[in-house]
Structures are given as C-alpha cells and as structure tokens.
C-alpha cells in the first residue's frame, strides 16, 4: 500500500477515535453533572474532530473519482469502520442529550405542579 493511503488511513483513525472519545465523555459528564450545555459543546467539539475525518474520507473519494485509484487494504477498511462508528456514536449522543433534557424538563415541571 502506498505511503499516502497509509497516512490518510491513520489520520482517519486518529480523528475518528478522538471525536468518538470526546462525544462519549460528553455524555458521561452530563450524566454526572447534569450540565446539558456543556455536553452539547463537547459533542460539537468532538464533531469537529469527526469532521476532520470526513474531510480525509472525502479527499480519498474525490481522488478516486478523478481517476487516481485508492488501494483498498485492511487498514483502510479499519479506518472506515472507526469513522462510521464515530458518526453513529455522535448521532446517538445527540439523541441522548435531547432525551435527558426532555426528561429533566418534564421532572422540573412535575415538581412545580406538585
């Protein structure tokens, strides 16, 4: 496999993994502190890392579309797996924050009504 594809694959893994970790940390912190705003901010920061991974993937796909084939390897497949997992974790984390916020609002309203 050529050096450029190895480098891009490793960068894809790095940014995807960093973003995924930040998103998971955001949800864990929110569950400990109840700070929804901080969780949203941290998920957004993790999303920027995932965005970096997306840019790498897009560059690889664009190169291939422009007639510069990208050699497929187990490393590239692994990198793509990390990227897709990071996207799924980010999306689920956003849903969890929305759910947590809705439940918190519902509980606060019930306490006010009591």
Image: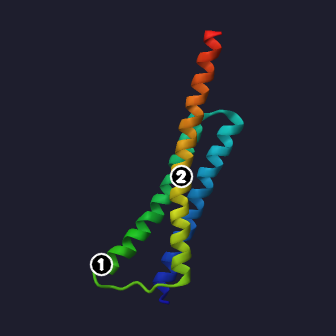
Q: Residue furthest bottom?
A: 1
Q: CA distance from mark 1 to mark 2?
A: 28 Å
Up-down: is 83 above or below 32?
below
Q: Residue at x 39, y 75 (%)?
A: 60
Q: Residue at x 51, y 85 (%)?
A: 73
Counting from the top left corner in percent of width and height, residue 31 is at 68, 38
Task: Classify residue 56 as left or right of residue 21.
Answer: left
In the image, 76 versus 19, the foreground residue is: 76
Counting from the top left corner in percent of width and height, residue 87 is at 50, 58
Crowding around mark 2 (Cα neighbors within 10 Å: few <14, some 14 to 19, many 20+) is many
Q: Residue furthest left?
A: 66
Counting from the top left corner in percent of width and height, residue 88 is at 52, 56
Crowding around mark 1 (Cα neighbors within 10 Å: few <14, some 14 to 19, many 20+) is few
Are the residues tagged 1 and 2 within 8 Å (C-beta)? no
Q: Residue under label 1, please give it.
A: 65
Up-down: is 70 above or below 21?
below
Counting from the top left corner in percent of width and height, residue 1 is at 50, 90
Figure quadrant of residue 10? bottom right
Q: Earlier in the sequence, mark 1 or mark 2?
A: 1
**In what quadrant of the picture does the C terminus appear?**
top right
Looking at the rendered structure, which numbered label has been put on residue 90?
2
Task: Classify residue 46 as left or right of residue 31.
Answer: left
Up-down: is 43 above or below 114?
below
The tally of labels here is 2
Task: Classify residue 113 as left or right of residue 84.
Answer: right
Up-down: is 110 above or below 49?
above
Figure quadrant of residue 62? bottom left
Q: Residue at x 63, y 51 (%)?
A: 24
Way the structure is coloured: rainbow
What is the secondary structure assignment of the residue under circle 2?
helix
């Amino acid at each position: 496999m050529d050096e450029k594809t190895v480098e891009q694959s490793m960068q894809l893994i790095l940014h995807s993994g960093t973003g995924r970790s930040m998103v998971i940390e955001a949800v864990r912190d929110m569950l400990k502190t109840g700070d929804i705003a901080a969780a949203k901010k941290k998920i957004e920061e993790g999303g920027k890392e995932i965005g970096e991974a997306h840019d790498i993937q897009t560059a690889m796909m664009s190169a291939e579309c422009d007639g510069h084939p990208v050699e497929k390897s187990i490393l590239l497949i692994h990198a793509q797996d990390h990227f897709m997992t990071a996207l799924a974790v980010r999306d689920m984390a956003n849903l969890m924050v929305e759910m947590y916020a809705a439940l918190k609002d519902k509980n606060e309203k019930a306490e006010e009504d009591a």
